[in-house]
Structure formats: structure tokens, C-alpha cells
Image (cartoon, rainbow, N blue to C red):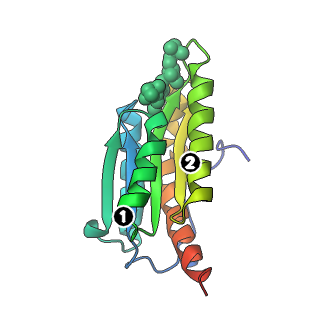
Amino acid sequence: MATQGKNLSEYDKSQMPEAKNFRFGLVVAEWNENITEGLFKGAFDTLKENGVINENIVRWDVPGSFELIYGCKKMQQSYDMLDAIIAIGSVIEGETKHFDFVCQGVTQGIKDLNIQNDIPVIFCVLTDQNMQQAIDRSGGKFGNKGSEAAVTAIKMAQLRIDAKF
Ligand SMILES: Nc1c(NC[C@H](O)[C@H](O)[C@H](O)CO)[nH]c(=O)[nH]c1=O
Ligand SMILES: CC(=O)[C@@H](O)COP(=O)(O)O
């Protein structure tokens, strides 16, 4: 189902696990920072809304979405007490095929991190044809993908705990 007609910020709070003791890492790409800062705010605010404390949220910045792969890998290695990591980026199509390669690269890279390591990495990377689409999905008329990613991170953190028993 497409994002159109949905609100990415809406979720059923009654279905949320207890998150007050969870610890999260957020790796944020600087490219299109007007978008990625909006995504970060959506994710941060939703984590707080679910009881996560400031001290349990760590943020690293990387230059672009392609660097999210390395940044998330190093965060997995450096902070093994984290319950989940959110990779935040905004890739906007230009004139060349570079968009395709960046999108495919970061998608495959983050998929690989979820296979190879135990801390889940949530894919909060917008891949838009133009800036307006990105604006609409980072706090605009379709809500905030960052909020959706935070909900996903909390649920995956709980699944990781449940899977150990
Ligand atoms: N065009 C966008 C990029 N491009 C930069 C790459 O992500 C990467 O930093 C570079 O290729 C060096 O490795 N990055 C975005 O996040 N968003 C874009 O729209
Ligand atoms: C996703 C990109 O790298 C892209 O925005 C770069 O633009 P262009 O393809 O016009 O060089």
C-alpha cells in the first residue's frame, strides 16, 4: 500500500511494548539535512513519547546515506548494549543513475547488517523523486517516516528479547 492516504505518524499506542528501559542508536545522514533533521525529530519524539529517556538515545552523523552502512556497522560494534539502531537518510533523484546506485547500495548494506549482526537496524531512508515527496514524508501531509521507524525499532527491540526465550 502506498504512503498516499496514510499517515506515517499514526500508530496504535495500545500495541506498543514497554520501552522505558530500551536503548537506541540513531545514525543520521547530512545530505538533504532539512529532511533528515525532520526524520530525526520524528523518531526522537516518538521514542520519548514511549518512555525512552534522553540518556538512552545516542546519535551519530554521517555525510550521506551510503555512509549509513558503515556508521551503523560501527555503532553495532561500539555499543553492543543497544536494543536497536535507526538509519536515517533522504535520497532524492537527480539527473543521473547515481540515485539508483545509492538507493540499492544502502538498502542492500542495511539488509546485510541485519543478517550479519544481532542488533536490528531499521531502514528509515526516504528514496524520493523530488523534494516535495521528501517533505511530505518527513513531517508533512503524509506524516513522518521517522516516527514510523521509531515504532518499528521499539517492536523489533522487544522481538529480539522475546526471541531469546
Ligand atoms: N545524492 C544523495 C546522496 N549522495 C551521496 C552518497 O550518499 C554518498 O555520500 C557519496 O556517494 C559518497 O560516498 N546521499 C544522500 O543521502 N542523498 C542524496 O540525495
Ligand atoms: C542521489 C544522488 O546522488 C543524486 O541526487 C545526485 O544527483 P545527480 O544524479 O544529478 O548527479
**What is the distance, in whole Å, between disc 1 and disc 2 at their CAs?**
17 Å
Mark 1 is surrounded, within 10 Å at the Cα level, by few (under 14), some (14 to 19) or many (20 or more) other residues, namely some
Residue 41 drawn at (x, y percent): 36, 51
In the image, residue 161 sits, relative to residue 104, either above or below, namely below
Residue extending farthest to the right is 1
Q: Residue at x 56, y 68 (%)?
A: 156
Q: Secondary structure at mark 1?
A: loop
Q: Is residue 2 above or below residue 95?
A: below
Q: Look at 52% across and 42% down and name the residue there.
A: 125
Please state which amino acid type lies under the numbered disc 1: Tyr
Q: Nearer the viewer, residue 76 or 150?
A: 76
Is residue 129 left or right of 41 when viewed as pictured? right
Q: Callout 2, which amino acid? A: Ile
Q: To which residue does mark 1 refer? A: 79
First in sequence: mark 1 or mark 2? Answer: 1
Query: Which residue lies under the disc numbered 2?
Result: 110
Q: Is residue 26 visible?
A: yes
Residue lying farthest to the top in this orientation: 95
Q: Residues within 10 Å of mark 2 (few under 14, many from 20)?
A: many
Q: Which mark is residue 27?
A: none
- Where disc 2 sits, the SS reads helix
**Which residue appears at 59% of the width and 57% of the height?**
116
Looking at the image, which residue is at 38% across and 70% down?
Answer: 23
| Image x and y of residue 154, in percent | 50, 69
Label 2 beta carbon less than 8 Å to ligand 1: no
Mark 1 CB near ligand 1 (8 Å cut): no
Q: Residue furthest left?
A: 55
